Amino acid sequence: MLATRALRLLGKRAISTSVCVRGGHGVAKIEAYTLPAYFDRRENPLPDVCYVQDLSAEQASLKEKEQGAWAALSNEEKVALYRISFKQSFAEMGEGTAEWKSVIGGVLFVVGFTGLIVMWQRKYVYGPVPHTFDPEWKAKELQRMLDMRMNPVEGLAAKWDSENKQWKK
Amino acid sequence: MNTLIGYDLVPEAKTVDSALRACRRLNDMASAIRILEAVKDKAGPHKEIYPYLIQELQPTLSELGISTPEQLGMDKF
């Protein structure tokens, strides 16, 4: 009673019947995310709302027909009624998407891009490799290892034929 | 109904029968078909349960004029 009196002072606003006006600010806007949502899940077969909220004219007339005997509905009409209330049937819910292709593609793309970054880094960021990597140095290193008979039983020197000065066949 | 599907069981024919009649009272044919789909899904790998249920429910289905998802071609995609 008081609320409607206060409303008349504030000016006419359209409100639903059971809302109170606080401090002259009017009615809070109802956000879409606070309302019951529709979702297709196997474990929740009957969601809180129908999939199609705003019915077209023929859908509305179909809904009228639903009030009567269901045996009078044709198969197409039954499917249409189902599609008004639900988005996907159980069979359609279960089938996979092709999303994995995008995922694999994206991953490979990012890996390739990283490879480019690494190559650029090797060329422009890092300095030269130490002189001990030169082929001549490496050859002398190997000779030294053979001379001191490194791993003579099963490893390096075992494979070297020291009489003929070549690798064992 | 969602709670019933949440349980680890396939509902009896009597229970599904009552649910279908409730759909008829509410003039909601889509939910009736959805319930049949859900019950089939609940049976999981035990493929013999759903045909048995449909066999038990056949009188009710004919009486109320409900088609099974198979008759409407909704079990394929």
Image (cartoon, helix red, strand yellow):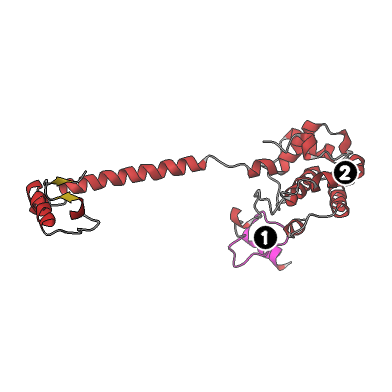
Above or below — where is A162 with respect to A62?
A: below
Q: Position of residue A59 (x, y in %)?
A: 75, 36
Separation of disc 1 and disc 2 at Cα? 64 Å
Question: Which numbered marker is on residue A8?
Answer: 1
Q: Is residue A8 visible?
A: yes
The one nearer the camera, A12 or B8, is B8
Q: Determine the secondary structure under disc 2.
A: helix
Between disc 1 and disc 2, the foreground one is: 2
Residue topped by disc 2: B55
Residue drawn at x 23%, y 58% is A153
Q: Quadrant of residue A108?
A: top left
Q: Position of residue A52 (x, y in %)?
A: 68, 42
**Residue interval drawn in magenta:** A3-27
Q: Determine the secondary structure under disc 1.
A: helix
The one nearer the camera, A91 or A132, is A132
Residue drawn at x 72%, y 38% is B75
Q: What's the residue type where badge 1 is placed? A: Arg
- Quadrant that contains the N terminus of chain B: bottom right
The one nearer the camera, A112 or B66, is A112
Q: Is residue A61 visible?
A: no
Residue drawn at x 81%, y 55% is B11
Neighbour class for label 2 at 10 Å: few (<14), some, many (≥20)?
Answer: few
Q: Position of residue B62 (x, y in %)?
A: 90, 39
